[in-house]
């Protein structure tokens, strides 16, 4: 959606600037057109700076999300390892208890 709005803005601004340039070429001494050209140019540069700022924010957010996802994967791996260790410990204890009981029965 943002790209569509950006394309619409660029097309509208190009149309406006082209039209004003044609008028200004026809009447280069028209102070109103000169002022309008300056205002449209200022608007164009301001919006461009906002778009660049937004891209910077988007990049920072993407980097933070990637870092968060990496931490989540690491936490999940640690939990799975702890669970596997716990199961192995329980199995080992049960097996040792079973062997001890069998040995006691034999003796």
Image (cartoon, rainbow, N blue to C red):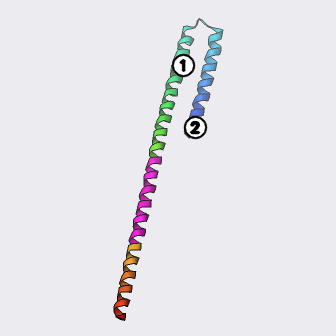
Which quadrant would the N terminus be assigned to in this image? top right
Q: Residue at x 47, y 43 (%)?
A: 63
- Residue 21 in the magenta stretch? The answer is no
Q: Residue 71: x, y in percent?
A: 43, 52
SS for dot 1: helix
Name the disc covering residue 54, or none: none
Residue drawn at (59%, 37%) of the image: 4
Q: Of 54 and 96, which appears nearest the observer?
A: 96
Q: Which segment is the magenta one? A: 66-87
Q: Residues within 10 Å of mark 2 (few under 14, many from 20)?
A: few
Residue 28 on image: x %, y %: 61, 7
Judge from the rendering whether residue 22 lies leftward or rightward of residue 101; answer left or right: right
Drawn side of residue 36 relative to residue 78, left or right: right
Give the labeled residue for mark 1.
41
Q: Is residue 15 above or below residue 66?
A: above
Instruction: Residue under label 2, please give it.
Output: 3
Residue 68 falls inside the magenta stretch = yes
Name the one closer to the observer, 44 or 36: 44
Residue 12: where, in percent of width, then height? 60, 27
Q: Could you tell me which residue is drawn at 35 percent across and 88 percent down?
A: 101
**Which of the image's four quarters has the C terminus?**
bottom left
Residue for point 49% across, 24% down? 46
Above or below residue 15? Residue 30 is above
Q: Are marks 2 and 1 in contact (CB under 8 Å)?
A: no
């Amino acid at each position: 959606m943002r790209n569509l709005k950006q394309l619409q803005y660029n097309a509208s601004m190009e149309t406006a600037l082209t039209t004003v340039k044609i008028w200004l070429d026809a009447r280069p001494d028209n102070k109103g057109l000169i002022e309008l050209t300056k205002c449209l140019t200022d608007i164009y540069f301001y919006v461009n700076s906002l778009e660049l700022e937004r891209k910077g924010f988007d990049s920072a957010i993407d980097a933070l999300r990637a870092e968060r996802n990496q931490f989540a994967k690491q936490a999940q791996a640690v939990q799975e390892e702890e669970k596997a260790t716990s199961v192995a410990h329980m199995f080992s204890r049960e097996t040792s208890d079973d062997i001890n009981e069998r040995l006691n029965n034999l003796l």
